[in-house]
Amino acid sequence: LALLDKAKFRAGNDHLILTGDTIAKGPDSPGTVDVARKLGASCVRGNHEDRMLLAYNAMHSHHLSLPLHEEPESPNHNDDDDDSAAADTLARDRDAIDEESMTHSDFVARRLARSFTRPQIAYLKSCPVILRVGLIPTMGSVAVVHAGLVPGVPLERMDPFQAMNMRTVDLGTHVPSEDRRGYPWERWWNFYQKKVPADKRSTVVYGHDSKRGLNIKRWSKGLDSGCVNDGRLTALVIRGDGRQEV
C-alpha cells in the first residue's frame, strides 16, 4: 500500500495489475488477495498461485468410490447410518492415500489453500495466465505474464506452465525452460521485436525472476526486484500517453 501511495494510485481512476506470486511470499496471503479484490486489481497467475490452486482442486475433487462388500442386514439395520459411516471411512482412506504420496511442498500448498475463503479462491481462479492489456503508445501491444513468453509464438499457443515458470530459452529449438542454462528469454524477445514491423511489436511486463532482479528493457519490463529477500517492491506506472515511470 505504501508503494501505491508513492505512485499516487487513485482507485476508480487508475487500474492496478499484479504480475503474480501474490501469495505464499508473506505473512498474510489472504489479506493480500483481499486488498487486490478491494482495489479491483487484475492479476496474472504465477507459479505459486498455480501450485496452491492445484492443491485446492485436489482437496475438493470428487473421487469415485469402490463398491463396498455387502453383508447380510439385520432387522434393525439403518441404511443412512451405514452410508454416513462408509463415506467417512472412504474419506479417511482417500486422505491417507493422498498424504502418503505428498511432498513437503504439497503439504505447504494444502495448508495455504485452507487459509483462503471461497471468494478469495474464486478471485485467484479468475486470474489468467496471460493478460492482454492492449495497445499503448510507445509500447505496442502490451501483455502481462508472470514468467515470460517465447517470441513469435501466439499468446493463445503459449505453454501455460512455461508462461508461469520459464527463465531461459534454447536458441536452437526455441524451447523455453525454467532453469538458467539457456539464453535469457527477454534478451531474445527484445532482439525479435527489432526484426518485426513496427505495428507488430509487443511489450511484455513480468515478474518471477528475483535473482535477475529489476530488468527494464525497451520491449520487456521485469519488475521482480526481490522485495521478499530484503529488496524493494517495484511498480511500473504507465500513463495514458505511454510515458513510463519505474
Image (cartoon, helix red, strand yellow):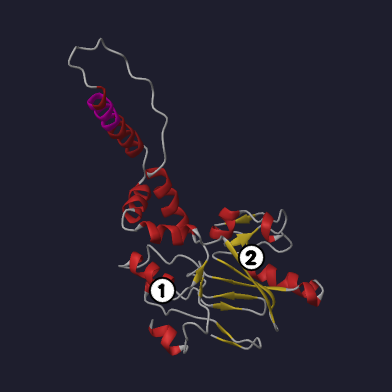
Give the residue type that dot 1 points to.
Lys
Give the residue type that dot 2 points to.
Trp
Q: What SS does tag 1 mark?
A: helix
Q: Magenta includes 83? A: yes
Q: How many marks?
A: 2
Q: Which residue is mark 2?
A: 185
Q: What SS does tag 2 mark?
A: helix
Residue 38 is marked as 1
Mark 2 touches mark 1? (CB < 8 Å): no
User: Does residue 48 appear in this view?
Assistant: no
- Quick check: 231 above or below 28? below
Q: Magenta includes 140? A: no
Provide residue 86's location: percent of width, then percent of height: 28, 26
**Quadrant housing residue 121:** bottom left
| Range of magenta residues | 81-89
User: Does residue 69 appear in this view?
Assistant: yes
